[in-house]
Image (cartoon, rainbow, N blue to C red):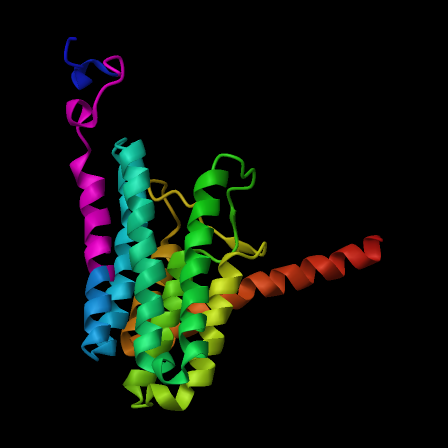
């Protein structure tokens, strides 16, 4: 009986090594993945400020890889899957472990359950986003809090507490509530502004550049407080939008 040759299977479909992968956008994705892993390592070593900063760096790199891929026309299915897996590590696992190591580990079951709710919420949020990306009609809004923003909320909280010398044990209930808030809001149906209609290649008025400069100055004055405040307001914006829509429907009814 002739030996079965596995190389003859699916010869009509090009293999990954034949097609290759685009280097530039995947470099940014790899950098985001490394930053997320670095945040976990630093949290295990008790360096929570470094862990929080690493999560913010992962957020910046994650925002760049997609835009670089679109601007250079290097989008690929491999890049999309790689980006999703990187997001799960950087914005799902890393923030959950950072907040657990910082404040939740002394709470017993409630502590790790709160951290798991956040981690599971991030996984469900990414899975829903990947399956509904083509079905969403209004690209101006996300459905549910984006996982990078939820991660920034957790990282900002840890960074602020560490900046003021507040021990995680003293704010463990607040940390647990924040982890639950982030995890549940990620899988909610609340709308969050996406900013996808912003075209970076389009000319803008001079005052827009001035506002960007002022934003950098504001962040540089006190990064922990400003970043945490910005993402806390963004996290609450979905609830405010839902309330406004509810009040608008009542007069119409």
User: Is 25 above or below relative to 180?
Assistant: above
Q: Position of residue 89 (x, y in %)?
A: 29, 56
Residue 248 or residue 109, whichever sits in front: 109
Residue 115 or residue 131, whichever sits in front: 115
At x 41%, y 54%, the residue is 123
Residue 145 or residue 215, whichever sits in front: 145
Residue 168 visible (yes or no): yes
From the image, give the main secondary structure of the stretch colored magenta: helix
At x 42%, y 57%, the residue is 122
User: Is 235 above or below relative to 10?
Assistant: below
User: Is 15 above or below relative to 248?
Assistant: above
The boundaries of the magenta stretch are 10-36
Residue 78: quarter of image: top left
| Residue 33 counted in the magenta span | yes
Q: Position of residue 76 (x, y in %)?
A: 29, 32
At x 46%, y 84%, the residue is 173
211 horizontally vs 110: left or right: left
100 horizontally vs 32: left or right: right
Please count the marks in the image. Answer: 0
In the picture as drawn, the residue positioned furthest to the right comes out as: 253
| Residue 35 counted in the magenta span | yes
Q: Position of residue 239 (x, y in %)?
A: 60, 64
54 horizontally vs 81: left or right: left
Residue 218 visible (yes or no): no
């Amino acid at each position: 009986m002739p030996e079965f040759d596995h190389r003859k299977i699916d010869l009509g479909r090009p293999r990954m090594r034949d097609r290759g992968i685009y280097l530039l956008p995947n470099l940014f994705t790899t950098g985001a993945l490394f930053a997320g892993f670095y945040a976990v390592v630093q949290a295990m070593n008790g360096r929570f400020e470094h862990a929080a900063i690493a999560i913010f760096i992962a957020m910046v790199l994650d925002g760049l890889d997609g835009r670089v891929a679109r601007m250079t026309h290097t989008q690929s299915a491999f890049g999309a899957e790689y980006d999703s897996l990187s997001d799960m590590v950087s914005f799902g696992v890393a923030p959950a472990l950072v907040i657990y190591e910082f404040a939740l580990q002394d709470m017993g079951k409630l502590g790790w359950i709160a951290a798991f709710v956040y981690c599971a919420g991030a996984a469900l949020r990414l899975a829903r986003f990947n399956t509904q990306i083509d079905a969403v009609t209004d690209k101006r809004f996300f459905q549910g809090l984006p996982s990078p923003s939820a991660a920034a909320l957790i990282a900002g909280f840890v960074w602020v507490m560490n900046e003021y010398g507040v021990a995680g044990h003293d704010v463990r209930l607040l940390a647990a509530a924040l982890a639950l808030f982030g995890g549940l809001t990620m899988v909610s149906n609340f709308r969050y502004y996406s900013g996808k209609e912003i075209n970076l290649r389009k000319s803008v008025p001079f005052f827009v550049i001035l506002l960007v400069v002022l934003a950098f100055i504001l962040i540089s004055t006190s990064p922990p407080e400003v970043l945490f405040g910005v993402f806390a307001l963004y996290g609450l914006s979905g609830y405010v939008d839902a309330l406004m829509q509810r009040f608008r429907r009542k007069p119409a009814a």
